[in-house]
Amino acid sequence: MSTKDMLIENLVFKGINFNKNKIGKGTYEDCTFVNCVFNGSDVSGIIFVSCLFDQCDLSLMNTSGTAFREVKFKGCKMLGIHFEECNLFLLAMYFNNCQMNLSSFYKLKLKKTIFRNCSLQEVDFAEADLTSAIFDNCDLSGAMFERTVLEKADLSTAYNYTLDPETNRIKKAKFSQAGLGGLLGKYDILIER
């Protein structure tokens, strides 16, 4: 079995700095990474299946060809990650309490993805398919929505977003009354509460 075919199952990795100890190539299934540092690491070509990243620093990680299949990120720092470079086969990720500023999901299919209590400032969602996605209590300040599919998405508790209903598909999406300014901003109108 080559290192590329290596299968690592049901292991817990705690407090490991993967900048110093490079992560081995292969498939990681049902593994948990706790307080690990991947900042700037190369995880290209690695397959993560049903894994949990808890309180990890994944900022600027190289995700070229990386597979995230049913992967959960909890309390992670994930600044500047280019998720559009990932392996798209069975791509499914869930985010809870993560800092994801300056990351990019350009053109990705992220149907039903859940973003809960996340900072998504200046994140690129251009041309992404976010059908039925949930943005629960997320800061979307400066996030880019351009030709983005947000049909049936729930942004009712999201805040600081600006998106143009004429250049994005928002049929049956949920917004709060407080978020109307983010939908109507280009019209330079005043909304009184």
Image (cartoon, rainbow, N blue to C red):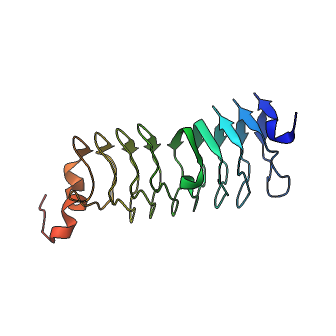
Question: Residue 129: where, in percent of width, then height?
Answer: 39, 46
Question: Residue 163: where, in percent of width, then height?
Answer: 28, 60
In this rendering, position of residue 60 left or right of residue 106: right
Q: Quadrant of the C terminus?
A: bottom left
Number of numbered discs present?
0
- At 63% from the left and 42% from the top, the residue drawn is 67
Quarter of image, res 111:
top left
In this rendering, position of residue 123 left or right of residue 54: left
- Spot the residue most to the right: 1
Q: Is residue 121 positioned above or below 148 on the image?
A: below
- At 44% from the left and 53% from the top, the residue drawn is 107
Q: Nearer the viewer, residue 187 or 105?
A: 105
In this rendering, position of residue 58 left or right of residue 90: right
Question: Residue 109: where, in percent of width, then height?
Answer: 45, 44
Q: Nearer the viewer, residue 103 or 53?
A: 103
Q: Quadrant of the N terminus?
A: top right
- At 44% from the left and 40% from the top, the residue drawn is 114
Q: Nearer the viewer, residue 43 or 141?
A: 43
